[in-house]
Image (spheres, rainbow, N blue to C red):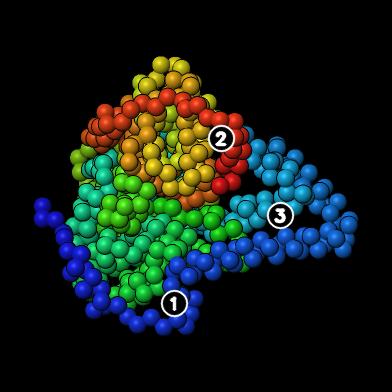
Amino acid sequence: MEKFDYTLRELMLARRREKPKCIHKTWADIPSGLKAVFTDIWLAAQLAVLAFLYAFFAYVFPAFFYLSIAITVCTALYVFVCERDAQSKSSWLFLFLVSFGCGYIVYFLASKRVCYGYDRKRYAQIYARSKEYLGGTRPECSQAVKNDCEYIYNSGGFVPYCNTRIKYYANSRDLFENLLYDLEQATEFIFLEFFIVADGVLLERLIHVLSRKVQEGVEVRFLYDDAGSQGVLTAATKKRLRAAGVDFKVFAKMFAPFSFGLNFRDHRKIVVIDGKKGYVGGCNIADECINQHKMHGLWKDTGVSLEGEAVNGLSLTFLRQWEFATKSTVDYGKYANRAEKFESDSVVVPYAGGPEIEEALCRGVYANVLSGARERIYMMTPYFIPDGDMIAQLIAKARSGVDVRLVLPAVPDYPFIYVVSRSNAERLMKNGVKVYYMNRYFVHSKVMLTENCVTVGSVNIDMRAFYEEFDNGVYTNDEGVMKDALADFNEIFAMNEEQVPAKHNFFYNLIAGVLRIVSPLM
């Protein structure tokens, strides 16, 4: 297969020819770096206004302060008895304790029920209208896999598929080379959905392909997250994409009044080509993902490609998000059930979770996979901030004789989160779990492998991914994918030493303990 390739010099020359003049007239025209500063100032200003108003009313009307204390106590009682995990409850109760009576304001502004109630109704309508196009099968499989499929369907409505060819990529450079080649073969439509879209060599190659495909009459829809792309995607590049005919849309603008902009982000990574081939993984459209740009050391990322019936599930997941983000009406029948069938009995379930679903689906998938494991549990994640129940589950598995191993980055990106991840990992080390830090690498992969199945996608093992972000993954028991994922893990184990709990001083342990308490709020 001939690889699609361009030199960096050719790409930069093409960009100079195509680059439009940028006149700073609107918010969209402001450079992304400056926009990110404005956004941070805007968010800080909103919090300052709320704090000022609270202090003003508490000073002018002393009764307001006592009323706030009463509301905080009632909110704390509600949090204590509601269906939250224990760690999340502890975080909110800690906030109420130190917030001088105004913590309830933050709680309600960040609440899915309060801030996302109307949007959930819109999602429910979208899901109901598109459900008939899912298709899917009830394949023969082991009891453990059958239980996982039942959970994913009953909790999120995502169906299992067979007749699908699936391939595992141990590094994102190979994934993107194959993706760019497959995009060249598109004849009808291309769907792309990414958390981060950043200027650079990778995006230049992508724009080159998409521009030519649009000229050939291919429909291209591209959805990106505003928070993820802040400061790395310029207004000029957005203009180039739209001028080329790409339907380039933003999900949830950051610059919004009195909203916690970092919540409810679209962290999914989905590509669909003609409804026949799809890609899912942890990779973003950014040069660090292909190690073209060194950021936090070398980059380790993974993904899978799909051909066959399961691609239909990816198409619908994208189109549902597109319909919600653009407030348009999608003709699902136009794009559904386009894939060729490949003879395969393997189960493939594309799934997605987020605030639109009552159940914490992505967390539930991981918990179910852990529950069914009897021989091995191998995990790869950039952040390890699970709730107490999942930590207890992993410890119980290790003490039961299951080979439990965790791969984390040796190079941090966010220092405070890294401290929490290492602190949680050391708790596991003391209870029989084997932990590996991948030397010189920032591990961005999100993979969980047992003897029964493997799941690959965009879902980090942290509270934000479980409860606030829109994420997605692919669950499968395909023997080839499981074999390749196992080989990937074994290579990491062979190249890196198993860690032992480190000795820390009192202040480090104190900071780590406090960060663990507030980690669900990060």
Q: Please state if 107 lies on the left or on the right of 191 as rendered.
A: right
Q: Is residue 284 visible?
A: yes
Q: CA distance from mark 1 to mark 3?
A: 34 Å
Q: Residue at x 25, y 76 (%)?
A: 16
Nearer the observer, disc 1 or disc 2?
Answer: 2
Q: Are marks 1 and 3 in contact (CB under 8 Å)?
A: no
Q: CA distance from mark 1 to mark 2?
A: 44 Å
- Residue 516, given in percent of the width and then of the height, sits at 57, 37
Q: Residue at x 49, y 76 (%)?
A: 27
Which amino acid type is marked by label 3? Ile
Which amino acid type is marked by label 1? Asp
Q: Is residue 84 visible?
A: no
Q: Nearer the viewer, residue 70 or 316?
A: 70
Dot placed on the residue nearer the N-terminal end, 1 or 2:
1
- Residue 385, given in percent of the width and then of the height, sits at 50, 38
Whether 177 is drawn above or below 416: the answer is: below
Per the image, label 3 sits on a secondary structure element best described as helix
Packing grade of label 2 (10 A; few <14, some 14-19, many >=20) is: few
Q: Which residue is mark 1?
A: 29
Whether 437 is drawn above or below 120: the answer is: above
Q: Which mark is residue 508?
A: 2
Nearer the observer, disc 2 or disc 3?
Answer: 2
- Residue 373, given in percent of the width and then of the height, sits at 39, 24
Q: Which residue is mark 3?
A: 105
Dot placed on the residue nearer the N-terminal end, 1 or 3:
1
Q: Residue at x 16, y 60 (%)?
A: 5
Q: Nearer the viewer, residue 168 or 217?
A: 168
Q: Please state if 72 lies on the left or on the right of 306 as rendered.
A: right
